[in-house]
Image (cartoon, rainbow, N blue to C red):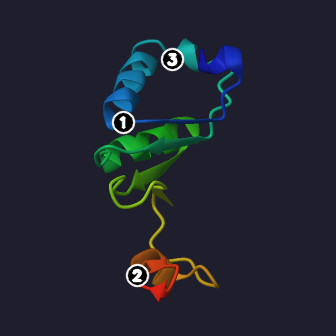
Amino acid sequence: MFTDEGVTFSAGVPTIWQGIRTALEADPSLAEGLLLNRLACGGSAPAAEMMEWYLQTYDVTFLQAWGMTEVRAAPTLWPFGSCSLPSGPLGPSVLLEPQLSGSSGPL
């Protein structure tokens, strides 16, 4: 389906990506015409070895997603292998110290 639909980005839990890896290792022809270049993975931490396999074998970058839906509806995505925090107006203070505010100001 990935190749038939021209999928370039997909998201799922580690179990999904491990299952797809198993299928690709068993039959590499399944990847013919694969346009996929990014995967988002959440729910639990994906194995670094699996993320490296996708990168080295198919040049597919993993974006590790994490967040608590009870606290915030939008997850945080971080590319595999990135060790630095972004700089600029949306730098580390926004990522690491969220501020809550109400109609009368900060809570």
The residue sitting at 37% across, 52% down in the picture is 69
| Image location (x, y in percent) of residue 30 | 55, 14
| Image location (x, y in percent) of residue 57 | 51, 36
Instruction: Please state which of the two labelled residues, at mark 1 or mark 2, is closer to the viewer.
Output: 2
- Tag 3 and tag 1, C-beta contact below 8 Å: no
Does residue 83 show up? yes
Find disc 3 in the rendering and name its residue: 28
Q: Looking at this view, is 4 or 93 the one in front?
A: 93
Tell me which label, 3 or 1, sits earlier in the chain: 1
Tell me which label, 1 or 2, sits earlier in the chain: 1
The residue sitting at 42% across, 23% down in the picture is 20
Secondary structure state at the residue bearing disc 1: loop
Does residue 84 show up? no
Q: Looking at this view, is 70 or 58 the one in front?
A: 70
| Image location (x, y in percent) of residue 51 | 41, 45
Label 1 crowd bin: few (<14), some (14–19), many (20+), radius 10 Å: some
49 sits left or right of 98 in the view: left
Indicate the quadrant where residue 73 lies.
Answer: bottom left
Secondary structure state at the residue bearing disc 2: loop
- Going by the numbered disc 3, the residue's amino acid type is Pro
The disc label shown at residue 13, or none: 1
Tell me how far mark 3 sits from mark 2, CA to CA. Answer: 44 Å
34 sits left or right of 67 in the view: right
Secondary structure state at the residue bearing disc 3: helix
Instruction: Please state which of the two labelled residues, at mark 3 or mark 2, is closer to the viewer.
Output: 2
Indicate the quadrant where residue 13 lies.
Answer: top left
| Image location (x, y in percent) of residue 56 | 50, 43
The residue sitting at 43% across, 52% down in the picture is 64
The disc label shown at residue 97, or none: 2
